[in-house]
């Protein structure tokens, strides 16, 4: 007997049926929009290697956040570019630092927006590494334990400014535990930690490093970020962060690491985030600008892939685009209803 025709195709026949059986959907409530803030006034300057993204000053970032809030985007992830860098990265924990000022200004105007802050030193150190530099066995390297204390101070200063969630991206061992303890001791036990738990040493951070002016001046980040040949090690990192008190764990980048997202989803029961990083964003934007790919189709497909793998939260520079696409859909449907009615 022949295989029944249309066996699999019956449920693909119309748009309505396809929607009814759809397993995965993209919700605005899952998305986090990253933003870059720097000194000055009235700045809204495009970031060339990240088409559609901008550098903002404190005043203009507040307007941007009001717009994101009105579009229904629940959260932002904030990165700061300080006026001065030094070997310690001391502007990272200053109460009048750029991120701290931005958080205060945003929190005053945007009552619903979740403000997440990136906790790291690389934008603030003159050498561009994510921690203090020392010599280990005759080689210059990042000093793990000396860095931890500074990360704790940064997290507390962000919490003091009003951050809802702090997000350490440095990849030092033990930082989640130290940050949790520092927050608790300072009276911020209600502030959550979203840890960059499985952050790989990736070439896909290229556009971000240009935007954040944070490339390492010597060497690379391979002595602290994960080696992308390893998957089991990533799961161990995630487990350690959960044990140390991470409330949400992140896999970063996203697209080349969906196996890690999937395995983390099977194994752990905390919320899982993934970071659709700058290079992943830039390659779709660039191809779309050349007319080689349809931006909305491919971005949606990539983001759905992350959800299908098991991500609860997606940090993506496409968040605002997605909000606008969904709004266009709503407009289209209400226009259709009116013309039928
Ligand atoms: C800083 C940091 C990086 C990113 C987020 N936080 C870059 C890096 O580790 O060099 C990358 C984000 C992106 O590429 O979008 N530690």
Image (cartoon, grey):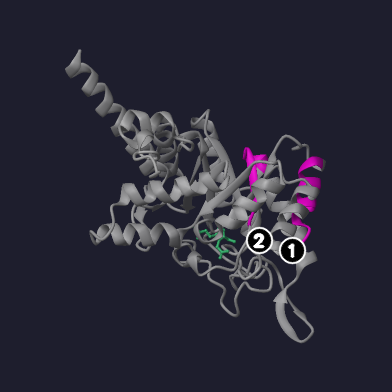
Which residue does the image show at 68% across and 69% down from the upper left?
224
Residue at the top extreme, as displayed = 341
> Residue 247: x, y in percent?
70, 42
Q: Viewer-proximal residue, 128 or 265?
A: 265
Quadrant of res 14: top left
Q: Viewer-proximal residue, 270 or 265?
A: 265
- In the rendered image, which quarter contains the N terminus? top left
Q: Which residue is mark 2?
A: 170
Which residue does the image show at 47% across and 67% down from the upper left?
206
> Residue 166: x, y in percent?
65, 46
Q: Are marks 2 and 1 in contact (CB under 8 Å)?
A: yes
Q: Quadrant of ligand 1?
A: bottom right
Q: Residues within 10 Å of mark 2 (few under 14, many from 20)?
A: many
> Residue 131: x, y in percent?
68, 66
Q: Is residue 151 left or right of residue 289?
A: right
* Residue 94 seen anywhere in this rendered image of the structure: no
- In the rendered image, which quarter contains the C terminus? top left
Quadrant of res 321: top left
Which tag is nearer the camera, tag 2 or tag 1?
2
- Magenta range: 159-184
Q: Is the CB of mark 2 within 8 Å of ligand 1?
A: yes
Q: Is residue 163 magenta?
A: yes
> Residue 71: x, y in percent?
39, 32
The kind of secondary structure element at disc 2 is: loop
Which residue does the image show at 44% across and 34% down from the upper left?
22
Q: Is residue 166 left or right of residue 78?
A: right
Which residue does the image show at 71% across and 57% down from the upper left?
235
Return the mark for residue 147: 1
Return the mark for residue 336: none
Residue at the bottom extreme, as displayed = 138
Q: Is residue 4 left or right of residue 190?
A: left
């Amino acid at each position: 007997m022949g295989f029944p025709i249309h066996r699999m195709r019956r449920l693909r026949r119309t748009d309505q049926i396809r929607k009814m059986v759809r397993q995965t959907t993209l919700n605005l409530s899952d998305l986090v929009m990253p933003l870059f803030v720097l000194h000055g006034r009235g700045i809204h300057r495009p970031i060339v290697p990240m088409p559609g993204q901008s550098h903002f000053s404190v005043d203009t970032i507040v307007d941007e956040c009001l717009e994101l809030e009105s579009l229904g985007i629940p959260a932002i992830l904030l990165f700061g570019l300080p006026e001065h860098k030094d070997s310690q990265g001391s502007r990272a924990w200053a109460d009048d630092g750029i991120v701290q000022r931005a958080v205060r200004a945003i929190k005053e105007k945007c009552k619903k927006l979740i403000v997440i802050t990136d906790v790291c030193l690389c934008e603030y150190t003159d050498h561009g590494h994510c921690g203090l530099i020392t010599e280990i066995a005759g080689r210059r390297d990042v000093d793990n334990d000396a860095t931890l204390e500074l990360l704790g101070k940064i997290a507390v200063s962000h919490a003091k400014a009003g951050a809802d969630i702090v997000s350490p991206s440095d990849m030092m061992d033990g930082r989640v535990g130290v940050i949790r303890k520092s927050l608790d001791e300072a009276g911020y036990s209600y502030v959550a930690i979203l840890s960059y738990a499985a952050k790989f040493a990736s070439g896909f951070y290229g556009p971000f490093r240009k935007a954040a002016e944070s490339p390492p001046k010597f060497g690379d980040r391979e002595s602290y970020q994960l080696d992308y040949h390893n998957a089991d090690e990533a799961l161990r990192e995630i487990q350690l962060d959960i044990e140390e008190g991470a409330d949400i764990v992140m896999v970063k980048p996203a697209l080349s690491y969906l196996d890690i997202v999937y395995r983390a989803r099977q194994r752990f029961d905390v919320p899982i985030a993934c970071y659709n990083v700058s290079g992943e964003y830039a390659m779709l934007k660039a191809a779309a600008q050349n007319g080689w790919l349809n931006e909305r189709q491919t971005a949606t497909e990539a983001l759905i892939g992350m959800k299908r793998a098991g991500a609860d939260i997606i940090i993506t520079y496409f968040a605002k685009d997605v909000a606008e696409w969904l709004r266009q859909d709503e407009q289209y449907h209400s226009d259709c209803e009116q013309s039928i009615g």
